[in-house]
Amino acid sequence: MSQTWTDKLAVGDLVLAVRDDKPGVVLDKEETAQAKYGDIANRRWRFKLHIDGQQGWLDEVRMRAAYKIP
């Protein structure tokens, strides 16, 4: 199975905003789908984040575009 850095994220992990390095914490991780293409199975996730006093859900694509791991 192929993996990205978002597959390895766990509840409690620290992430940083790409734009301004603002820290955030992963509060929850939920699998939304699983796709299989030949030998490769990919999971799709959504993440609940706490950043700068606010909480909200992001899908995997937005998470990879807007955040990074330290």
Image (cartoon, grey):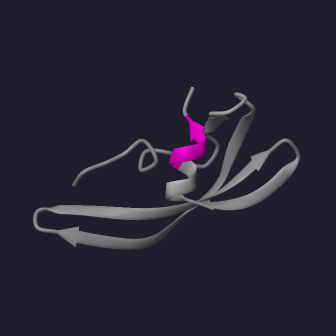
The residue lying toward the viewer, choosing from 19 and 69, is: 19
- Give coordinates of residue 27: x percent, y percent: 68, 53
Q: Is residue 66 above or below residue 38?
A: above
Query: Which image quarter holds the C terminus?
Result: top right
Q: Nearer the viewer, residue 31 or 66?
A: 66
Instruction: Give the residue furthest to the left.
Output: 38
Seen in the image, is 5 located left or right of residue 9? left
* Residue 12 in picture, x, y percent from top left: 64, 43
x, y percentage for residue 34?
A: 34, 71
The overriding secondary structure of the stretch rendered in magenta is: helix
Image point 85% across, 52% down: which residue?
Answer: 54
Residue that extends furthest to the right in the rendered view of this protein:
53
Instruction: Provide the residue span drawn in magenta.
Output: 64-68
| Residue at figure coordinates x 85%, y 41% from the top left | 52
Q: Is residue 16 above or below residue 65?
A: above
Q: Quadrant of residue 21?
A: top right
Which residue is pictured at 30% across the width and 62% down the height? 42
14 w.r.t. 7: above or below: above
Say whether residue 6 is magenta: no
Pick the front one: 63 or 49: 63
Q: Is residue 6 left or right of residue 49?
A: left
- Confirm whether residue 10 shows in the render: no
19 with respect to 6 (left or right): right
Image quarter of residue 30? bottom right
- Asked if residue 46 lies left or right of residue 57, the reply is left
The quarter of the rendered structure image containing the N terminus is: bottom left
Residue 50 visible in the snapshot: yes
Q: Position of residue 44 (x, y in %)?
A: 42, 64
Residue visible at 43% across and 45% down? 8
